[in-house]
Amino acid sequence: MVPVLDKNKVPLMPCSEKRAKNLMEKGRAKPYWCKGIFCIILQDEPKSRYMQDVVIGIDPGSKFNGYTVKSQSHTLLNMQSNAITDVKGKMELRKILRGGRRSRKTPYRKNKFNRSVDGMLPASIKARWNQHLNIVKWMSKLYNITKVVIEDVMAKTLKGAKKWNLMFSPLEMGKNWFSNQVDLMGHRLYKFRGFETFSIRKELGLKKNKDKSKKCFYTHCVDSWCIANEVIGGHTEVDNKKVVLLTPLRYHKRRLHEILPKKGAFRKDYGSTMSMGLVRGTLVKHVQYGLSLIGGTSKNRVSLHNLKTNVRLTQKAKIEDLKVLTIFRYNIAYLKPTLAL
């Protein structure tokens, strides 16, 4: 199913690939890519604006996440994403570097309150839940998302710990923050415990892959599909097993300088999220390499990276040879549907 937008990019009900192709051939619609997901924009006022409820199911994990966008009639999209796991290490490294600067004879500001703390929510926890929230916002631009359903993960506590330890754990705070943000968006939130998801999957006769790193529907998307179908209904069998693989683009953000000094105690500048005025991760069209992503910069040239693998294609692309299209946050790959386990 292809997402459909009106002239103002307001989501309508999706249509089949055949109908989308027919509309584009007749000039009644034009193609449009929203952060890597293909959709069409109608050039005329639609005959009907009847909208069905669309739900997004989320299966959060420690290393990978599963997402399913589903209506009562169709499974519109399945996605598997790598979880953001590097924030804690980056925060610790930043702390070490700042401490090192204060012990050297170099200008530095005085230590002050940590501005990265948002309501005492750790940055690593917020990054994980913010990833889910950003995908909900992304899908809301393509579909009429009215409900959000998530598998409710529970915080583990040590034996003998007080009861309030469970309520004030970073995990519980992250869940509460996510719930509040979903409420502000106007979506209704449903939660399922892990054993409830297992029961739903068992009733439908579906099995889950034990290898959590395997890229297929039955690894993570099977759970997100089950809880989404439990809320919206409509199917007793999976009607769409195609999976879109999302790999978050991670940048070397700007530091004061490199960790280790060079000859003469000189420390070079390190990292940035901009390359010659362009945001890194911007989708561009190059005269030779075609569609690619903007990477780093050196000697008035920018590097280009592959859309799917993020492998660097060149380091010597000229700005004048690029056509800027949009900004990407993920490397996107489309996986073939897999058979039942």
Image (spheres, helix red, strand yellow):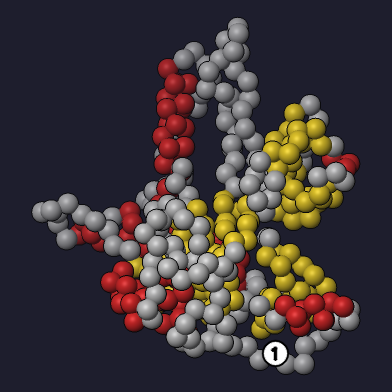
Image coords of residue 221 (percent x, y): 47, 67
Image coords of residue 182 (percent x, y): 48, 70
Q: Residue at x 64, y 36 (%)?
A: 272
Q: Residue at x 50, y 57 (%)?
A: 215
Instruction: Give the mark count.
Output: 1
267 sits to left or right of 44: left
Q: Is residue 291 above or below residue 240?
A: above
Q: Is residue 144 above or below residue 96?
A: below
Q: Amino acid at mark 1?
A: Arg
Image coords of residue 5 (percent x, y): 73, 77
293 sits to left or right of 223: right
Q: Nearer the viewer, residue 9 or 115?
A: 9
Image coords of residue 159 (percent x, y): 13, 53
Q: Nearer the viewer, residue 304 or 299?
A: 304
Quarter containing the N terminus = bottom right
Residue 252 showing in the rendered view: yes
176 sits to left or right of 17: left
Residue 145 showing in the rendered view: no
Looking at this rendering, what residue extends furthest in the left direction? 160
**Residue annotated with mark 1:** 49
Task: Answer few, some or many: residues within 10 Å of disc 1's Cα (few below 14, many 20 plus, some between 14 and 19).
Answer: few
Q: Nearer the viewer, residue 114 or 47?
A: 47
To which quarter of the image does residue 47 belong?
bottom right
